[in-house]
Image (cartoon, rainbow, N blue to C red):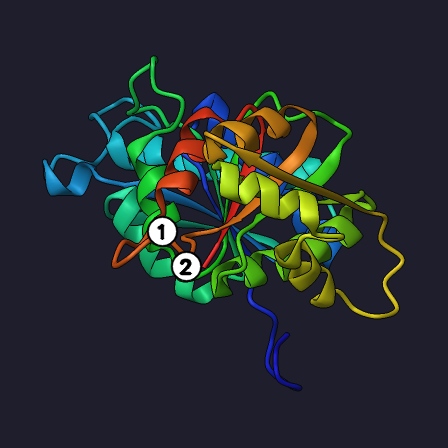
Amino acid sequence: MNPPGVPAKPVIVGYDGSDGSRLAVQWAAHHAAATGLGLVVVHCWVWPFFTQDLGPVPTVKDSGLRSAAQRIAAEGLGLARQAEPDVDTSERLIVGFPSEVLTRLSVEASLLVTGTRGLGGFAGLLIGSVSLHLAAAASCPIAVIRDDQPANGDVLVAVDGSPESDRAVIAAASLATTLHAQLRILHVRPYSRHVAARLADLESDPVIQQALNLLPGDTDLTVIEDSFAEHSVPGVIVHHTRGAMIVVLGAKGNNTLGARLGSTVHAVLHHAQGSVLVVR
């Protein structure tokens, strides 16, 4: 929530002309429309670091590296406006490396949106270095959008009772309300006989209950509760992403010391079959 009189921060999305960034721009435009926020499409331009020859080739109209960058930025703006014509959308062409520029801009955003891989990524990787860096370093929540996210499904939030998990629950509930979707709260404990026996004795999972207590009392969300004790916490979360519209995670959990990004989040970002929203 913004204080009265303070403009709401926009959604910021990175665009580099890749298929992944196209999907990210479209998703960001739809999200901005649903939330009533503005949208800024950012193209990061690195060529000025490597050459001063940025202008057009003599006698060749619209040639040169500067013109190419301007075309990419304009293309991203056009995609966003085509997806949601009524959203207040603008473009920014900024000199700098994407990870550094978008991390800096995240202070100005309510949400940062990126594709899984840009044009500079290796084809075999499920998530690129820029998206991974932003998930660890961005000042605002970051949505990493995949091209195989289902049109329907629930908003899945994985919880562990940590402060960042609590913030993920609040973000997931807001997103589920915006998308008119069900909210699924998932808690996975590392398996042991002791944990399994204790879960069997409990009428309800206290971590799930903690998450439920964060929801507004007058919410009309449909909430589904799932609690498991399994050997692989990330494996269970990844399995459940198959039927989810998006999975929401805190950037790190109770078992992460010092790191900006927890191992579970790292694994889910690499292997989830749908989109991922990381909340800090």
In the image, 204 versus 67, the foreground residue is 204
Amino acid on which disc 2 is placed = Ser
**Quarter placement of the N terminus:** bottom right
> 10 Å neighbourhood of mark 1: few (<14), some, or many (≥20)?
many
* Distance between the alpha carbons at the discs numbered 2 and 1: 6 Å
Q: Is residue 197 above or below residue 202?
A: above
In the image, residue 13 sits, relative to residue 271, either above or below, namely below
Which corner quadrant of the image does residue 59 belong to?
A: top left
Quarter of image, res 48: top left
Amino acid type of the residue that numbered disc 1 sits on in the rendered structure? Leu
Q: Which residue is mark 2?
A: 106
Pick the residue in front: 174 or 56: 174
Q: Residues within 10 Å of mark 2 (few under 14, many from 20)?
A: many
**Residue shown at the point (68%, 35%) measured from the top left:** 82
Of helix, strand and loop, which one carries label 2?
A: helix
Q: Is residue 137 visible?
A: yes
Residue 161, horizontal then vertical, whole percent? 54, 59
Residue 102 disc label? 1
* Image quadrant assignment for residue 52: top left
Question: Could you tell me which residue is drawn at 29 percent across and 18 percent down?
Answer: 122
Where does residue 37 sit, x and y in percent of width and height?
66, 60
Q: Nearer the viewer, residue 210 or 129?
A: 210
From this view, report whether residue 208 is shown above or below residue 216: above
73 relative position to 64: left or right:
right
Residue 186 visible to the viewer: no
Q: Residue at x 43, y 27 (%)?
A: 17
Please state the horizontal and vertical placement of residue 131, each as a whole percent of the image: 37, 38
Count of marks placed on residues: 2
Residues tagged 2 and 1 counted as in contact (Cβ below 8 A): yes
Instruction: State the quadrant of the C terminus.
Output: bottom left
Query: From the viewer's perspective, is 162 left or right of 56?
Result: right
